[in-house]
Image (tube, rainbow, N blue to C red):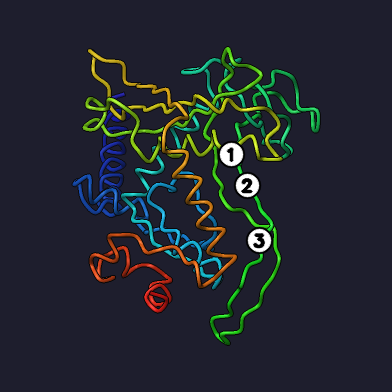
Amino acid sequence: MGTFRKHVSKANKSKLKEESAAFNNLSESFDPSMVVTANIPMIPKRESGIISQPRASSILKSCLRQHILGTVYQCRIEKYVPFRDRVTFGLGDAIHYWVQNTPWLFPDDRRVGWWFCRACEKTRLFGIRPTTKCENCGASSSACEYQEHGMEIKQKVKVRYVNRKTNKVDTKLVTIPVVSGHMDLFLAKDTYPALRVNELKSISSKQFPDLKAPLADHEHQVITYMEYLNQDPNMPAPVDDQVGYVTYISKRHDFKNIPIKMFAVENKGPVAERIAEKVKLYVRGLKHFPDHLAPPVGECERNHFGNYRAKHCPVREDCMRYL
């Protein structure tokens, strides 16, 4: 028995040495930051898109001149999202998914929207979360996933498209979106069947305690939805155009306060007028290009187009040429 124990002990020690050697070969450092770089590809993400109509999420600070020139010249905008921003946005996406697909915050009979079956990849219905099997493939209701509604308000506009290479002008009568957006969530309230828009926002623990009202960008976003959703032919239910919500979720909680603030946004005052004016400026700029081009944003003019925003604008040269 003693000989057997000595043999086992030697074998275990030898195995531990091998594992330790293997670990040392695979690990660059015990520094957690170094371990991250060794295991996670910290590369920026390249994003590209066509410049077109103003969007609800950015309508407050959007440059209508860029939207018009980008549409006329059919420009693309490209940017690189750093890894740290990808992590931040990923956390926000995860919170959105959690709120949209679980009853932790809003009960199943209150969350309303499109429901997508992951099994057959088809949209099932618009309403509250289904509890029955998928009528398309028979998959369990647990295969359902919330799908945000995409709003596109379109108008028939005569657009003067310009080919940048040949400088040839081609005037076309086309039906194009003039304002768009994606709603995070609809809530069934006492206004039912009229639904209320609810925008979900994750926010830093530094900003959260002092938040007394929705941020201006988010107020404009919700009011844009309230103003235009009832004109959207793909919206299957009426939307309350008087009151909507912005829900802020703190990225950190304490034991004194609820880590959520929910603000009711009223559709009244000059905000809706400013939004409508921006949409009109976009359409007018396309119809009468270049005679009624929207003015540049103030920060670009004040800095003689040498500021960061202007330097990274894909239509900067055209913008300055038409001044």
Secondary element type, mark 3: strand
Callout in the foreground (3, 2): 3
- Residue 247 at x, y percent in the picture: 41, 26
- Left or right, 232 with respect to 68, comes to right
Name the outermost residue toward the left: 31
**Marks 3/1: CA–CA distance:** 18 Å
Q: Are marks 3 and 1 in contact (CB under 8 Å)?
A: no
Q: Amino acid at mark 3?
A: Val
Front residue of 264 and 249: 264
Which disc, if any, is residue 228? Answer: 1
The residue that mark 2 highlights is 153
Mark 3 surroundings: few (<14), some (14-19) or many (≥20) residues within 10 A: some
Q: Amino acid at mark 2?
A: Ile
Front residue of 226 and 255: 226
Q: Are marks 1 and 2 in contact (CB under 8 Å)?
A: yes
- Residue shown at 25% from the left, 38% from the top: 13
- Left or right, 89 with respect to 146, comes to left
Q: Amino acid at mark 1?
A: Tyr
The residue that mark 3 highlights is 157
- Residue 191 at x, y percent in the picture: 59, 16
Which disc, if any, is residue 304? Answer: none
Quarter location, residue 112: top right
- Residue 6 sits above or below residue 292 on the image: above
- Left or right, 136 with respect to 148, comes to right
**Marks 3/2: CA–CA distance:** 12 Å
Q: The C terminus lies in which quarter of the figure?
A: bottom left
Secondary element type, mark 1: helix
Mark 1 surroundings: few (<14), some (14-19) or many (≥20) residues within 10 A: some
